[in-house]
Image (cartoon, rainbow, N blue to C red):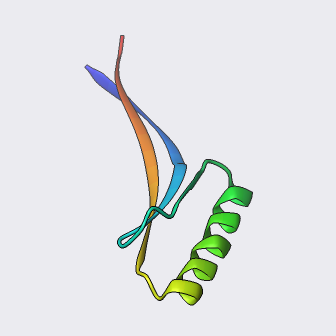
Amino acid sequence: MAIEVKRYGVIHYVAQCDECHFYEAGITESQRDAIRYQVRKHVEKTGHAVNVESGSSTTYRKVP
């Protein structure tokens, strides 16, 4: 039995503030850059900590 593994790389970006309702999300490289820019602005303005996540995807399937 062979297993095919397909990696899709980063499929989304999410930023969320620990202290308020600040939230940004996107799926493209340009959106990632915009999210980082907004995060920096939020941190500089409020002093809040913001978590940024990037999610990836991998599919495993049995090959006949």
Depth check, front residue: 9 or 36: 36
Residue at 69 percent of width and 67 percent of height:
33
Q: Quadrant of the C terminus?
A: top left
| Residue 39 in which image quadrant | bottom right
Residue 7, given in percent of the width and then of the height, sits at 47, 42
Q: Quadrant of the N terminus?
A: top left
Q: Is residue 15 left or right of residue 1?
A: right
Q: Is residue 16 left or right of residue 44?
A: left
Rendered position, 42 above or below 10 = below
Q: Is residue 14 left or right of residue 37?
A: left
Q: How many marks do you count on the picture?
A: 0
Can you name the residue that lies furthest to the left here?
Answer: 1
Q: Is residue 45 left or right of residue 57?
A: right
Residue at 31 percent of width and 24 percent of height:
2
Residue 20, given in percent of the width and then of the height, sits at 41, 68
Residue 4, given in percent of the width and then of the height, sits at 39, 28
Depth check, front residue: 8 or 34: 34
Residue at 64 percent of width and 71 percent of height:
38
Depth check, front residue: 50 or 33: 50
Residue 30, given in percent of the width and then of the height, sits at 74, 59
